[in-house]
């Protein structure tokens, strides 16, 4: 869907506390999360403006966002599991 917000807290509300804690405590996680949100914002802005880039470039941006999201989600679930132990 075009212009859909993929903010982590919206996509993973059950991990909200973990997101907040890792964002506060882990500088690497914080930097990667910031990069993820920047990519998501850039993609949404391009979609709003009618995708003024070629399909290959748009696909690469979305691929980068997906890779970051997977990496961040893995960190979140590991943190969640450790905190629950």
Image (tube, grey):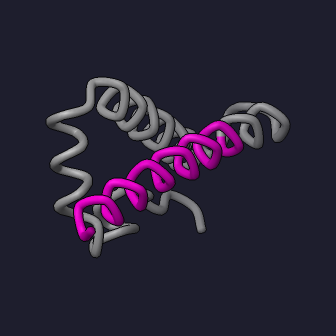
The verdict on residue 84 being magenta is yes
Q: Is residue 56 above or below residue 81?
A: above
Query: Residue at the location (15% across, 36% down)?
Result: 24
Instruction: Name the spot of residue 55 as percent of width and height, x first.
Output: 82, 41
Viewport quadrant of the C terminus: bottom left
* Depth order, front residue of 50/57: 57
Residue extending farthest to the right is 56
Query: Residue at the location (44% across, 58% down)?
Result: 6
Q: Is residue 1 left or right of residue 82?
A: right
The verdict on residue 33 being magenta is no
Residue extending farthest to the bottom is 14
Q: Main secondary structure of the magenta part?
A: helix
Instruction: Name the spot of residue 68 as percent of width and height, x first.
Output: 55, 41
Residue extending farthest to the front is 85
- Residue numbers of the magenta segment: 62-85
* Depth order, front residue of 78/1: 78
Instruction: Name the spot of residue 79 as percent of width and height, x first.
Output: 33, 54
Q: Is residue 33 above or below residue 76?
A: above
The quarter of the picture where residue 1 lies is bottom right
Query: Residue at the location (68% across, 34% down)?
Result: 52
The quarter of the picture where residue 56 lies is top right
Instruction: Name the spot of residue 4 as percent of width and height, x first.
Output: 47, 62
């Amino acid at each position: 869907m075009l212009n859909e917000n993929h903010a982590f807290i919206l996509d993973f509300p059950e991990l909200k506390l973990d997101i907040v804690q890792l964002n506060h405590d882990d500088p690497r996680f914080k930097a990667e999360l910031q990069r993820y949100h920047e990519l998501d914002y850039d993609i949404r802005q391009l979609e709003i403006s009618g995708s003024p880039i070629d399909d290959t470039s748009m696909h690469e941006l979305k691929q980068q966002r997906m890779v970051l999201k997977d990496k961040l989600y893995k960190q979140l679930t590991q943190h969640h599991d450790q905190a629950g132990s």
